[in-house]
Amino acid sequence: MKLIDTNIFVYSLGSEHPYREPSLATLKRIREGEIDANISTEILQELLHVYRRRNQLQLGVELFDDLVGQFPQPVPIVAATAIIARDVLERYPSLQARDAFHAAVVFEHNLEGIISADRAFDRIEGLRRFDPKELVA
């Protein structure tokens, strides 16, 4: 199983961008069961944060509700996850804290990796990033 990064959802709903179509195609493959993937509760929080910051809260709420329907068992963030995230951030201080939490979910639950357009994940030893452009090539 792979974790789906927030940016896949954001690009899929955004304006024209090189990652828009690959993100849409990746999400389609996930919905059709071709790719085994899930989200975490941190992804849900981050989506609400992103769309609230953009003054598009209603879009964020609709996406949130859709994702809870599609992924009724998101991976929870618990104390063990937070401790791993702290350790990741300590090893990679230039990483964003939210990305450290995403990496921690992958590590804690022995996932295959993260589906993301964010190359920052490439720096984390032992973490595999699945680029949506490569998943749909």
Image: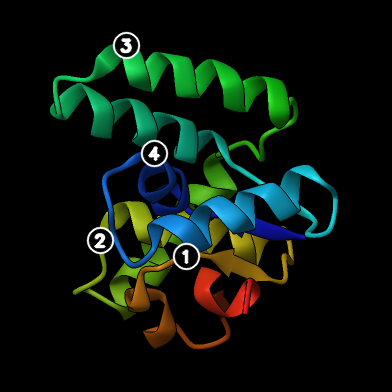
| Distance (Cα) linking label 3 and label 4 | 13 Å
| Distance (Cα) linking label 2 and label 1 | 14 Å
At 47% from the left and 58% from the top, the residue drawn is 21
| Distance (Cα) linking label 4 and label 2 | 23 Å
| Distance (Cα) linking label 1 and label 4 | 15 Å
Residue type highlighted by circle 1: Ser
Residue type highlighted by circle 2: Gln
Which quadrant, please, contains the C terminus?
bottom right
Dot 4 corresponds to which residue?
Answer: 13
Dot 3 corresponds to which residue?
Answer: 58
Q: Earlier in the sequence, mark 3 or mark 4?
A: 4
Q: Which mark is residue 133?
A: none
Q: Earlier in the sequence, mark 1 or mark 4?
A: 4
Q: Earlier in the sequence, mark 2 or mark 3?
A: 3
Residue 100, horizontal then vertical, whole percent: 39, 61
Residue type highlighted by circle 3: Gln
Relative to 53, residue 33 above or below: below
Observer-nearest residue: 29 or 127? 29
Which tag is nearer the camera, tag 1 or tag 4? 4
Residue 20, horizontal then vertical, whole percent: 40, 56
Q: Which secondary structure, mark 3?
A: helix
